[in-house]
Image: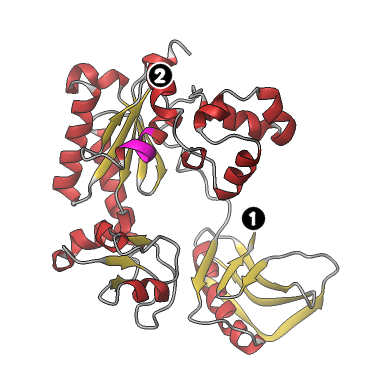
Amino acid sequence: MAKANHRVIMLADCQSFYASVEKSTHPEYIGKPLVVSGDPARRSGIILAACPLAKQYGIKTAERLGEALNKCPDLIVVRPHMEEYIRVSLHITEILQSFTDLVEPYSIDEQHLDVTGSLALFGSPEEIARQIQHQVRSETGIYVRVGISYCKIVSKMACDIFAKKNKEGIYVLPAENIARDLWPTPIREMFMVGSRMSRHLYNMGIHTIGDLAQTPLHKLKSRWGVNGEVLWRIARGMDTSPVTPGSFHQQQKGVGHQMTLPRDYASWDEIKVVMLELCEQVGSAAGIRGSWVMSLVYLAKEQIMTILQVSHGRREWMIPRILRMKCTKPLMYCFFVIGTACLFVELASP
């Protein structure tokens, strides 16, 4: 731990990333409440991102678009443009790599940096963070918040709990200030703790991160096993994992596609149209890899598996007569819930 504490690790987080990219691309949206969502014309889908102005109306990520429009009738709704978001994210990665070669994407809008070896070139951690903010803002129009600490876990919490809430958008949380600054924080704000886990911890009398950090480890392990130890280590800021460039870009193991439906579909004739479209999307993406793909639909209640499409490379064959077979096991190649359809296919080697 002593050596790890000498590291300087940052977590750079883009504010309302999708919405910020849209405003940067369309200056006419600046100063107006905006969300990125499914289908504006049909007023369907969920909120993928909301700009700070939209959040002032109480609009939250993952709520239904109709509910958001009720809160703010003048809300600007745009469909997602993932190619543009990926392009901007990669551009931000290049900016971060100009400060250090140790950059590890955590998600499309969050990236870890190890700037330990860059201090002599670029100044103090706070100065580097301000330079990053300025360069990203000037080149992409995106505002970046930066958490700074000695490890990835604590830099993540420094960003989420503190940097996102202060005016400068930068927060330094050294190891010696963990007990003073981090431990009084409500347990629901800790990294890796959701609403359900919060309720379990409340029932154990654990209300703050400090309460969890000071709970005997054997008590947590007896209830949650290794996950209990993981939570205990997070609360105590124990993380020696390195910032590893390229770890986010591992070999793809599966191909999938999904869509949000404009309404609830109940009949097989309606569902079949959606599934055929999903099959086409998945088959096209997987076929480029030269794999044989068989698209299957499994209906749990009827235990019926339907073969809709077979494809290889860029060639595909639609099954002229829908083939159905009785299944004895719940294969679940297709997952279908009210309002959303998702298709998963199994890839076979060529």
Hey, which residue is sitting farthest top in the picture?
2
Which residue occupies 14% across, 68% down?
A: 28
Task: Determine if residue 279 is in view.
Answer: yes
Q: Which residue is mark 1?
A: 349
Which region is colored magenta?
Answer: 158-162
Q: Closer to the N terminus: mark 2 or mark 1?
A: 2
Which residue occupies 44% across, 34% down?
A: 185
Q: Amino acid at mark 2?
A: Ala
Residue 36 x %, y %:
34, 66
Task: Determine if residue 243 is in view.
Answer: no
Image vertical order of residue 270 relative to residue 349, above or below: below
Residue 209 x %, y %:
51, 31
Q: Quadrant of residue 227?
A: top right
- Report the mark closest to the observer, 2 or 1: 2
Hey, which residue is sitting farthest right in the picture?
328
Q: Which residue is mark 2?
A: 175
56 with respect to 153 (left or right): left
Q: Secondary structure at mark 2?
A: helix
Residue 20 x %, y %:
25, 57
